[in-house]
Amino acid sequence: MSDILLAEAIQYSFRTGQALDDEEYDFAFDLEEATRALSCWSGVDNATRAKREIGRMWADLNASPYLELFPRDLNAATMYNAVRFWRYFRDSYNAYGREREHRAKNIVKNSEFMATALFMQWARANGAEFTNIDWGVATFIDGCAEQVRVLSECVVDRHERENPGGFAMSFFKNQQKVEHFARTVRTDFQSQLGVSASSA
């Protein structure tokens, strides 16, 4: 995997203590960032686990959840694009949070793992090319600015209905609560996109 990416001037550092070199390579990432990105790629459950305690994702390299994230047939381009998606989506998503008042900003920040998982699922059904190593991830995310904004608003609005006055940090680490919450947000998101499309 690492050698395949190196041939494309992409550094994947999977060894502890191996420094990333952004000057020598076009793109560089490490095992921890790959784990975050692939956790979101695999779904909301693993995204929530990674947010809660990422070190446990590597507790047993011969069992789940590690093998769910890093199966032996994992496509190198998929991992690379998942990491780029994780970076670019979070930047865009959190930018909308920074425009809101403090509590909403905090909700957006703490929901970024779940939101990335949901948006990855939506993207895969809407033209995302994760297996194409030349896919323009940044361009894709830039073209989805309205959808990212809508998702951020759905997350904040739904959180304030289901967890009014509660702490966002602990809420978004709760596996059971986030599983239910994500299903509801997905429905809200799809509904709002439908409204936006019909009014355009």
Image: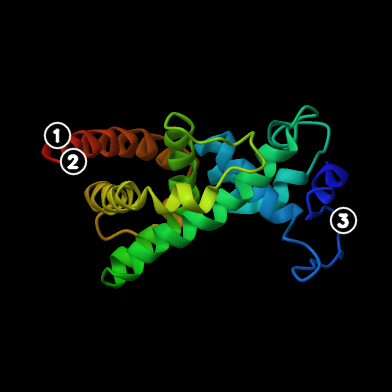
The residue type indicated by label 3 comes to Arg
The C terminus lies in quadrant:
top left
User: Which labelled disc corresponds to residue 196?
Assistant: 2
Image check: 17 left or right of 149? right
Residue 167 appearing in the image: no
The N terminus lies in quadrant:
top right
In this rendered view, identify the residue nearer to me: 83 or 188. 83
Q: How is the image coloured?
A: rainbow
Q: Sequence order check: which comes first, mark 2 or mark 3? A: 3
Q: Residue 64 at x, y = what percent?
A: 72, 32
Crowding around mark 1 (Cα neighbors within 10 Å: few <14, some 14 to 19, many 20+) is few
**Contact, CB < 8 Å: mark 2 with mark 3?**
no
Query: Badge 3 is on which residue?
Result: 15
The local secondary structure at tag 2 comes to helix
Crowding around mark 2 (Cα neighbors within 10 Å: few <14, some 14 to 19, many 20+) is few
Q: Residue 24 at x, y = what percent?
A: 81, 67
**Contact, CB < 8 Å: mark 1 with mark 3?**
no
Residue at (83% x, 32% y) in the render: 62
- Which dot, 2 or 3, sits closer to the camera? 2
Residue 13 sits above or below residue 188 on the image: below
The local secondary structure at tag 1 comes to helix
Residue 77 sits above or below residue 20 on the image: above
Q: Whole-Å distance between the Cαs marked 1 and 2? A: 6 Å
Residue at (34% x, 53% y) in the render: 145
Q: Residue furthest left?
A: 199
User: Which labelled disc corresponds to residue 198?
Assistant: 1
In this rendered view, identify the residue nearer to me: 177 or 81. 81
The residue type indicated by label 1 comes to Ser
**Contact, CB < 8 Å: mark 1 with mark 2?**
yes
Q: Whole-Å distance between the Cαs marked 2 and 3? A: 46 Å
